[in-house]
Amino acid sequence: MKTDKKNHEDGIVEYVLENASGMKVELLNIGASITGIHVPDRNGNLSNVVLRNDSLEEYKGNLHLLGATIAPVAGRVKDAEIEVDGQKYRFDKNDGNHTLHSGELGVQNKAWESGIVEEAGVEKVKFTTKIDNYPGDPEINILYSLGEDNTLKLEYDVRSAGPTAVAPTNHVYFNLNSDLEATVGNHFVKSSASHYLKMDDALIPESIEACEGIFDLREGRMLQEVFDSSDPQIEVANGGYDHYFLLEGEDHFEVSEVDSGRKVTMTTNFPGFVFYTGNNLDEGLPLAGRKPQKYMGFCLEAQASPAAAHMDLGFRIEASGDYRRRTVFRFSVED
């Protein structure tokens, strides 16, 4: 495996990870972002299976957060406040009465410190940023590494000086099609997750529900079936999934696309993930290579849901000292 680094005059730094089989991952210091994952189809043809802005400068705004690392708290914080060590911390409100992706405090569009490191013989790209004026003044680290088995590992290492609240994730959008104008409607999704969080009209989780009907993915389901559904929860999310699925034990999630044969399987030690199907993408999105439109990509946002601050989910987002989590995406090809 080899790692290349390229510095730009405007402070933007790019990294490229490549393994012996030709899989390539492209990273950017703005938002510690994933800008490219190039994997083969069943005929051995490589193409980028993630959505990418049409210029590197776009990542400094990055309205739809393509590939960005979100911290300290990804997702919606109810009423824009959270309790840390008995004290309430108030975010700015940027989503009605609530806060989405940490609001102005979020680091997804900022330049992170970065470098190539080696741990236990594995070369990794490490991004670091510090969040001041927030409980615990946490330092957020994310490390990316590429395996020879076509696995991309994301390791989150948060270090705080005291009690804090953290729920980081990565917001990369996948599209496994070789057809660059095709949406993800032809993707087949499968998961052993048995419960998800039902949302109110403001997309704030309000209850834990069994994965039944359109949310039952145990036998697999085409995403177009979801997009065509009249289920009230699909409609409240603007015609697709934007829901948190709870994971237990060996639960995993996989998505495949029949024409290319590509498949991505996610495993994580986070307690769950948001499955978002690009319901709010639009034709104005400055995409490189692909046609901008609704449902052009999907996100697998492994994280600890901030809903844990107002619901009993069996886990918390409060932390102190060291906080470590990981997510692994494995890419393969089906015959």
Image: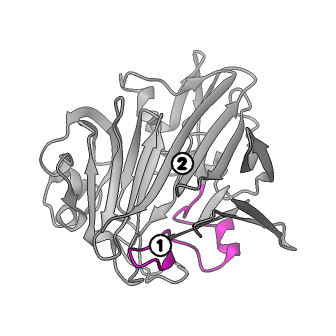
As helix, strand or loop, the secondary structure at mark 2 comes to: loop
Please state the extent of the stretch shown in magenta in the rendering.
40-68
Relative to 316, is 57 above or below? Answer: below
Residue at 45%, 59% (x, y): give it: 331
Provide the residue designation for mark 1: 40
Residue at 48%, 24% (x, y): give it: 316
Relative to 119, is 1 above or below? Answer: below
Please tell me in which quadrant of the rendered image residue 257 appears: bottom left
Provide the residue designation for mark 2: 101
Q: Identify which residue, 49 or 331, lies in the foreground.
A: 331
Q: Identify which residue, 307 or 66, lies in the foreground.
A: 66
Under mark 2, the amino acid is His
Query: x, y (%) of residue 238?
Result: 28, 62
Q: Is residue 146 magenta?
A: no
Query: x, y (%) of residue 323?
Result: 63, 28
Q: Which quadrant, please, contains the C terminus?
A: bottom left
